[in-house]
Image (cartoon, helix red, strand yellow):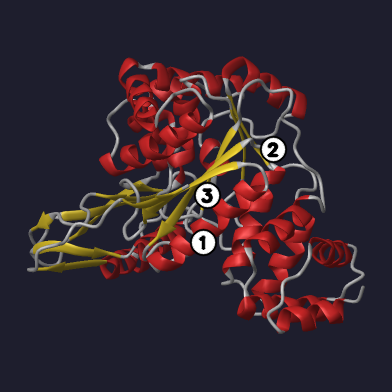
């Protein structure tokens, strides 16, 4: 078998077999196939696409290129959740304890952030003493005892995907739905979950700004998951404005605590109930989505959800008193109010620009080696559809430096205030099974 023949075959729009895809991925991982040939293949895939069968074969070849997490020692159906990313996306901090509180095992591997704010691991490290590194034995033990553990990715998961992603980034082939879907799903499948719930974002602050593109990506990932023997569901949710009010690490932890107590932003709570009910249903802990949703609402109102968060934090070395006293979280030295420059209705909030403002404060990384300031970030005081008067506070900035003109300017650019009525945008666009 020769790589050049496979390039010709895909260039001409023909379907690659499982053996051909396995040959290609194994050869590339072992550096027997050079970058220039894989670049040609990536471009052929970009233009010709892949069938569902090809996507499944590609995903599984990437899964098998490295280690796979064995969760067989954990009792019950393990359901993972993945978000395609957004601004103020605090869902894992809420969903993990919420879903665990109704008896669903949450064995989650999460990452660090690169961009607007930190990732889930960075946010958890806002809690004094919290440990994100556990042995596999301790990880499984905690999930069996408490239904919850969250750790950083360890081992050599999907090395083929890492190599291919780096190549796509410099060959203008990142925006290929088959390659995006296979990349995401290979990591989820290698992480060992029995079922997967996907939160696919769309809007100004999302990777997929166009709704139809987001639907196509969601369908591709669901087909791959189901084809690989993992029951998979995708929820397409809005990211035309930040989720909730907080954008920043410790600020988002505080918002997660509020939400688990029933005092959080309504959009954040609604999205977590939607995603969580899918997780509970796939774990076969409820006979219907409606029953699952009621179980989760009861867990919030009864205090079970917040108690599970305390157990989770304590079991991984964190200080659980932070849950009752969030003022113990890292706190910025300065709070600065950004005022509305006009009266009217808020018709636009660029989630991307709000995220950039948080990053300029130090809430996110510009490179993998950047240091994050866990205390800083922005808190939205007004969101889409809200009426404001000139001089009203629209955003509160939490900063460790008083000179933040560039941040204030970025926030002003993010907001559009006009005398036109705002037409409500759905939070959930679709659910794909």
- Res 375 → quadrant: top left
For disc 2, the marked residue is 192
Q: Residue at x 27, y 30 (%)?
A: 263
Can residue 158 be seen in this snapshot? no
Q: Is residue 67 above or below residue 194?
A: below
Q: Residue at x 63, y 61 (%)?
A: 52
Give the Cα separation between the discs numbered 2 and 1: 22 Å
Q: Secondary structure at mark 3?
A: loop
Can residue 429 be seen in this snapshot? yes
- The disc, 1 or 3, on the residue closer to the chain's N-terminal end is 3
- Mark carried by residue 118: 3
For disc 1, the marked residue is 217
- The disc, 2 or 1, on the residue closer to the chain's N-terminal end is 2
Task: Measuring from the top left, give residue 406's x and y in whole percent.
Answer: 36, 68
Q: Is residue 122 above or below residue 344?
A: above
Q: Secondary structure at mark 1?
A: helix
Q: Residue at x 79, y 61 (%)?
A: 18
Q: Residues within 10 Å of mark 1 (few under 14, many from 20)?
A: many
Give the Cα separation between the discs numbered 1 and 3: 24 Å
Query: How many dots with numbers?
Result: 3
Please report contact status of discs 2 and 1: CB closer than 8 Å, yes or no.
Answer: no
Q: Residues within 10 Å of mark 2 (few under 14, many from 20)?
A: many
Front residue (pair 424, 246): 424
């Amino acid at each position: 078998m020769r790589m050049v023949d496979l390039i010709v075959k895909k260039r001409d729009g023909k379907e690659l077999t499982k053996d051909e895809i396995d040959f290609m991925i194994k050869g590339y991982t072992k550096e027997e196939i050079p970058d220039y040939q894989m670049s040609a293949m990536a471009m052929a895939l970009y233009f010709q696409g892949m069938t569902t069968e090809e996507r499944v074969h590609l995903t599984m070849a990437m899964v098998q290129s490295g280690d796979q997490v064995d969760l067989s020692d954990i009792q019950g159906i393990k359901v993972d959740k993945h978000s395609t990313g957004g601004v103020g996306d605090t869902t894992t901090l809420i969903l993990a304890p919420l879903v665990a509180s109704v008896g669903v095992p949450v064995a989650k591997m999460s990452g660090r952030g690169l961009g607007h704010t930190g990732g889930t691991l960075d946010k958890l490290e806002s809690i004094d003493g919290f440990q994100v590194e556990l042995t596999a034995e301790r990880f499984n033990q905690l999930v069996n005892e408490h239904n919850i553990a969250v750790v950083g990715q360890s081992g050599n998961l999907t090395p083929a995907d890492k190599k291919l992603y780096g190549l796509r980034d410099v060959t203008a082939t990142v925006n290929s739905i088959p390659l995006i879907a296979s990349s995401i799903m290979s990591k989820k499948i290698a992480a060992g979950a029995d079922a997967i719930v996907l939160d696919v974002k769309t809007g100004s602050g999302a990777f997929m700004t166009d709704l139809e593109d987001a639907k196509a990506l969601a369908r591709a990932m669901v087909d791959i998951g189901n084809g690989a023997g993992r029951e998979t569901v995708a929820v397409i949710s809005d990211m035309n404005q930040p989720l909730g009010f907080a954008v920043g690490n410790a600020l988002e932890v505080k918002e997660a605590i509020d939400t688990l107590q029933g005092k959080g932003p309504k959009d954040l709570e609604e999205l977590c109930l939607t995603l969580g009910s899918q997780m509970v249903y796939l774990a076969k802990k409820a006979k219907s989505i409606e029953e699952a949703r009621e179980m989760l609402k009861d867990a919030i109102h009864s205090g079970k959800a917040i108690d599970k968060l305390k157990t989770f934090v304590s079991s991984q070395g964190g200080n659980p008193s932070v849950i009752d006293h969030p003022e113990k979280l890292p706190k910025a030295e300065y709070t600065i109010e950004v005022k509305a420059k006009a009266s009217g209705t808020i018709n636009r909030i660029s989630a991307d620009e709000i995220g950039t403002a948080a990053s300029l404060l130090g809430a996110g990384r510009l490179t993998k080696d950047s240091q994050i300031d866990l205390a800083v970030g922005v808190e939205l005081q007004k969101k889409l559809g809200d009426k404001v008067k000139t001089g009203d506070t629209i955003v509160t900035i939490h900063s460790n430096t008083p000179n933040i003109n560039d941040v204030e300017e970025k926030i002003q650019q993010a907001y559009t205030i006009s005398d036109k009525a705002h037409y409500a945008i759905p939070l959930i666009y679709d659910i794909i099974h």
